[in-house]
């Protein structure tokens, strides 16, 4: 049986993507039970009805699979896979929250403008940013909002979280490695740290960062990242790197091919094969459980966490004495 030429042309891009995926060696980065270029694209197609604020752009909202919304799509799948692995509601802290696009994306499929209770996989979803719009974020469903400068040396969060989200925040910091290490005590043992930022080949990082810092506006991009810098970030903090990938070959808001799922998968496949290509990097790192932590890591002392339970217990002891 032969296929009509028009039908063959329609399925050819999908065949190319699948054939190329079969050539990827087994040692290539995979996460859980499926390779990410073939994760479900449905949430990406839903995203324009749920996203608040100015990102993605209005032009992106007219296409079915906006590549510029892949940042939320990656986080969406990593979070849902973590929920399936843990089989319990998870606690989240999102650093650099913006206007609440991330949680809006997580609520994909709900009626726009009607935010009910948080989905069952969320125990609590806190936000931390230099500036927060409490009313706006509360309307979206954020549990608590903390107005902190993440570079403040005295930064303290009220608890440890199952998942720490650092999505497009580290590139705005002059010493991202220092801030990253400072946030780790607020992730539970065995917890997940996920995020992303612009990426480029390592050989270009130093010159790119120098140019960024010469022309940066207030809270603009001042740090540049490569896959090598991400791997070093995980290694220095004794974290296991579970995902490291680029996102796309080509992106243009409103581009006509972004109506087609095969184009999105082709971009994802290219990013997986060539993560150092100038574009965006997305990653997932896991904090070791106590029994697997390195001896020096277990011996490290961190400042005690400020929690309501801890304060209450301290007050009770003081009253008894």
Image (cartoon, rainbow, N blue to C red):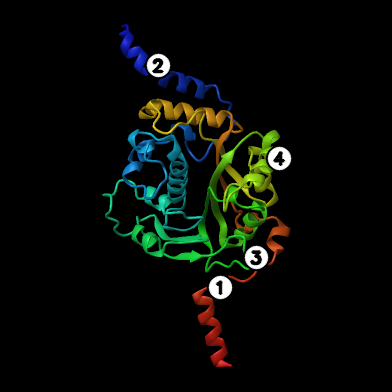
Residue bearing mark 1? 306
Residue at horizontal 69 percent and vertical 58 percent from the top: 297
Nearer-N-terminus badge (1/4) = 4
Where is residue 121, by image quadrant?
A: bottom left
Distance in Å between CA atoms under marks 4 and 2: 41 Å
**Disc number placed over residue 12 in the picture, else none:** 2
Asked if 6 appears above or below 266 in the picture, the reply is above
- Mark 3: few, some, or many residues within 10 Å (few <14, many ≥20)? few
- Residue 5 quadrant: top left
Task: Answer yes or no: is residue 160 visible.
Answer: yes
Judging by the rendered image, the residue that carries numbered circle 4 is 206
* Mark nearer the N terminus (2 vs 3): 2
Location of residue 295 in the rendering, given as x and y in whole percent from the top left corner: 72, 58
On screen, residue 230 above or below 28? below
**Residue bearing mark 3:** 153
Nearer to us in this view, 159 or 113:
113
Q: Distance from label 2 to label 1 (Cα)?
A: 57 Å
């Amino acid at each position: 049986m032969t296929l009509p030429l028009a039908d063959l042309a329609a399925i050819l891009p999908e065949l190319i993507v699948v054939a190329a995926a079969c050539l990827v060696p087994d040692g290539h980065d995979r996460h859980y039970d499926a390779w990410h270029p073939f994760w479900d694209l449905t949430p990406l197609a839903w995203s324009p009805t749920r996203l608040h604020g100015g990102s993605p752009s209005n032009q992106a909202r007219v296409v079915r699979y906006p590549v510029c919304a892949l940042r939320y799509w990656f986080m969406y799948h990593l979070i849902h896979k973590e929920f399936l692995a843990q089989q319990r509601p998870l606690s989240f802290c999102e650093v650099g929250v913006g206007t609440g696009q991330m949680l809006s994306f997580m609520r994909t499929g709900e009626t726009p403008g009607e935010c009910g209770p948080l989905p069952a996989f969320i125990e609590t979803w806190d936000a931390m940013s230099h500036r927060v719009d409490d009313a706006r974020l509360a309307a979206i469903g954020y549990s608590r909002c903390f107005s902190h400068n993440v570079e403040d040396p005295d930064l303290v969060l009220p608890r440890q979280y199952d998942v720490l989200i650092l999505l497009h925040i580290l590139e705005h910091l002059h010493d991202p490695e220092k801030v990253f290490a400072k946030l780790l005590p607020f992730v539970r043992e065995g917890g997940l740290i996920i995020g992303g930022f612009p990426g480029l080949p390592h050989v270009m990082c130093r010159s790119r960062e120098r140019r960024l810092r010469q022309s940066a506006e207030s809270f603009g991009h001042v740090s540049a990242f490569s896959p090598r810098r991400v791997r070093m970030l995980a290694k220095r903090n004794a974290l296991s790197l579970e995902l490291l990938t680029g996102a796309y070959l080509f992106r243009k808001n409103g581009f006509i091919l972004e109506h087609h799922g095969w184009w999105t998968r082709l971009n994802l496949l290219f990013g997986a094969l060539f993560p150092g290509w100038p574009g965006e990097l997305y990653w997932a790192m896991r904090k070791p459980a106590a029994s697997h932590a390195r001896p020096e890591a277990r011996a490290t002392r961190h400042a005690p966490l400020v929690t309501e339970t801890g304060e209450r217990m301290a007050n009770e002891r003081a009253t008894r004495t």
